[in-house]
Amino acid sequence: MKLRTKLIWYFVIFSVFIIVMLYFLTSFAIGDMNENDIVGEQQQIKEYCEILLNRQLIYGVDSLSDVSYIADELHTILTRPTAVYSEDGQMLYATVGFLSPKRSLELNAARENGAALSIVSDGNEMDVYLSFYVPLMLSENGIFVRVYSDYTSEYMRTMDVQTRITIGSAICIFILFVIIIVTVLRALMPVRKLTYAVNDYLEKGVFTPVETKTKKDEIGIFASGFNRMTRTISDQLLAITNEKTALAEALRYRKAFYDKVTHELKTPITIISGYADLMKNDPDNKELASGALNNIEKETERLHAYVTEILDASKQTMRERMNLEDVDLSALTRRIAESMAVRARRYDVDFHLSIEADLHIKADAEKIRQMLVNLLDNAIKYGLSGFPVNISLQKEGVSALIRIVNFVEDKIEDPESLFMPYMQASSEHESGSVGLGLPISREIALAHSGSIHAEMRNDRQIEFAVKLPLLRYADEAE
């Protein structure tokens, strides 16, 4: 059962209990008040009757034959129906309007106590009988005088008052009940939202923020804390998911890297081993030896390039191996672009240069050359034939900004992933690399207190942007 349903039932039971208790308490209180009023009034009637009887009847009546006179006289004076009974309880005479009670217990009580009062109520009527015993002075016997009073109208008014009080109290309790229920339900609304939010997370894995109208009470503070907690957990889960995805990608790239490295290293070693066997089997063949030595030298250089590229990927030794000096970045960029333009034209790729002059940086010239070669080589290998590569260098604030823009065959969804150590895009030209050129270039830029980023300009163009602090600002950047 839900909490709000329990609260409603608790309030309903409590309200019914309060109304019933209020009804009985008012009934008892009004009953006691009416009874006291009736007793007081009947006491006055009794005293008046005794005085009247003493004056007019006791000495004037010596037998039971004149009892009608007593009853009529009292009826006339008291304006209440009156009856006279014999000592054994037989009715001797009754005036008009007298209603005989079903029981006559008060007659015996009147003989013992001198007077007795009987209140008879059946729910719709209330009859009161005042009985008292009057001894006759000239006889050994006595008579009972019973005065009848109809309190039905007073009784009904009392019942009406009681009903009004009960109904009014019930209405007040109902209004209070509604106010309390509405207040409690509004106060519990954030708790319900918290419950729904927890259920959404358990069922769908989605956190839903809980909104409250006030944040100053305990529930509002609790809801705000819950929202902060869910945001923290969501951020942590997102970070864990991203790290898990990145780790899975890294493992996949690493496997591809090892497979490629194994292949690329095995190929020159196999060729070198083959030519060595040929020379060993025919050591006197100078022509064979000359050709074998040339091929062994080429494969050795190729193997050296692969090993150097792998070693350059070491982040820990990048800064330690740098020789910083004043480097004319404008001249260096133009020189490297012109030297690689020959290779680019082999793939029907032209370089378009836009280089601002006299931009100097504090850097290791060889590392910057390697970075530029890697970037331009990447643009040649992975760019589209017949489309230009735009190379620009300009001053931007305290930095020198290099932009290299080339066309690609397919849109790259996450260009920044190209800087991962084992990531390699598809190429339509050649595959003579292990895919560490861009990661090494990023490490070179970072080692010079710079940055390098990649982004898609559109579906077919990718831009690599390198920022390096200018010479006059290099010390501040470090």
Image: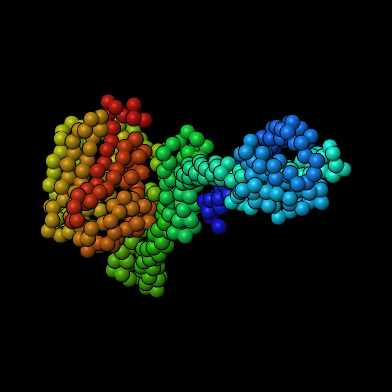
- Picture coordinates of residue 367 (x, y %)? 32, 42
Q: Pick the residue in front: 264 or 52.
A: 52
Q: Nearer the viewer, residue 126 or 192?
A: 126
Q: Could you tell whether 172 is left or right of 18 in the image?
A: left
Task: Determine whether, in the image, residue 308 is placed left or right of residue 193.
Answer: left
Quadrant location of the C terminus in the rendered image: top left
Image coordinates of residue 332 in percent, x first then y, are 21, 39
Point out the residue furthest to the right here.
Answer: 140
Camera-side residue of 80 and 7? 80
Res 316 visible: no
Figure check: 183 above or below 254: above
For image coordinates 15% across by 33% down, the residue present is: 357
> Which residue is painted at 61% across and 48% down in the image?
97
Query: x and y percent of residue 173 in the render?
Result: 53, 43
Is 6 above or below relative to 401?
below
Left/right placement of residue 163 relative to residue 409 reads: right
* Horizontal and vertical percent position of residue 219: 50, 40
State the residue at coordinates (56%, 44%).
Answer: 153
